[in-house]
Amino acid sequence: MTKKIIYQCIDAGSDYCPCYLAETNDCITCYHLQGKEFCDCSWRGVCIFQEYNWNGKRAKIARENFSAKIVDKKIIGDNLIIFKMAVTKTFARHLKQPGSYIFIRDINKPDYFHTPMSIMYADDVKGEIHVAIQIIGTKTKSLLSIEDEIMVRGPYWNGVLGIKGLKTLKNSNVLIIARGIALAPAVNILRYLVRNNNKITLIMDKGKFSETFIEDYIDESRILTIEADIISEKGKLIIKELIRNNHYDLCFSGGSDPQHDAIKRFLDQLSPHTKYVITNNKEICCGEGICGSCSMKVGDKTVKACKTQMNTSYIFEKGEE
Ligand code: FES
């Protein structure tokens, strides 16, 4: 018997649900809003179909752009910027969730310059968020000259896949492995896990940067940190030995797809019970499930990775495109 894969929309039950996908019978979670006659959804929150009807059979108001003040800008080496920006406390609170991201662009550039950026740190007391940006292409190069204000759209949450296991984890043992720019989302994740009293081992790899830029954001008295080049043979050995000798309940991989695959193989071999959470590396363009640039094949279905959550074992077992 084939297992039923449960696809859950990250926005289900949020202020942004139902969205435009409901209007075209493409809702990720609700069977009725996929044009079916029956309900077989596994969503346990407020009924999305009912919300849609109460809202006059229309999508709720979508996320809007706003201009945020730059509080601080730090350039590290020749390919990394950290922006600290002032936002409302509510907006910052929404972005404390693991996997949160926003779209940013120069306020003088057109909308298609918007680029998704993971939240590294969100302070809902001060009303401040921090993002780290790797300068690679046209969109990110255009952010270099920004000094005072930046255009922001958000909040978005699907920056990591397998989030359910992470959000419910308490008093457990966690291995976090992050390389390069994926150190930024790892900070938001590990701060969340520390709040839930989890014990964390963090393997940091600076990747193509001149330094690991997250020291100011982690409390080393609560986290065991190891610096390593994780794609070297020595780095792989460190990961394998840690997995072999510790009972990790969850492992997070922040980095490229080959990195995710390699760590998945180590886990399958040495600790198959460990839940696996990974950064979402799909090309996110609209973030709203509309444009299709983030599409990926899971089982026999094409899903929009910018909004869809599922157990990561399906991504590896069923063969992602
Ligand atoms: S980024 Fe446009 S559909 Fe996912």
Image (cartoon, rainbow, N blue to C red):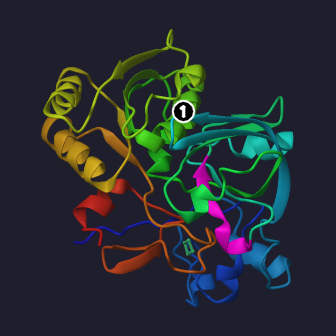
Q: Quadrant of ligand 1?
A: bottom right
Q: Quadrant of residue 318?
A: bottom left
Q: Nearer the viewer, residue 38 or 229?
A: 229
Q: Position of residue 268 (x, y in %)?
A: 18, 44
Residue at screen point 55% across, 84% down: 38
**Residue 117 highlighted magenta (yes or no):** yes
Residue 30, horizontal then vertical, whole percent = 59, 75
Q: Is residue 158 visible?
A: yes
Mark 1: C-beta under 8 Å from nearest atom of ligand 1: no
x 18%, y 30%: residue? 240
Can residue 18 be spotted in the picture?
Answer: no
271 relative position to 78: left or right: left
The image quarter containing residue 16 is bottom right
Q: Nearer the viewer, residue 287 or 139?
A: 139
Residue drawn at x 63%, y 83% is 33
**Are there few (<14), some (14-19), or many (20+) residues within 10 Å of tag 1?**
many
Residue at which label 1 appears: 187
- The local secondary structure at tag 1 comes to helix
Left or right of 80, for residue 252: left
Determine the residue positioned at 45% across, 28% down. 211
Instruction: Say which amino acid is labelled 1.
Output: Val
| Quadrant of the frame with the N terminus | bottom left
Q: Residue 290: image x %, image y %?
A: 60, 80
> Can you give x and y, in whole percent of width and height, for residue 238 in the image?
20, 25
Residue 186 lies in the magenta stretch: no
In the rendered view, tell whether residue 308 sits above or below residue 203. Answer: below
The stretch of residues the image draws in magenta is 110-118
Q: Is residue 310 above or below residue 185?
A: below
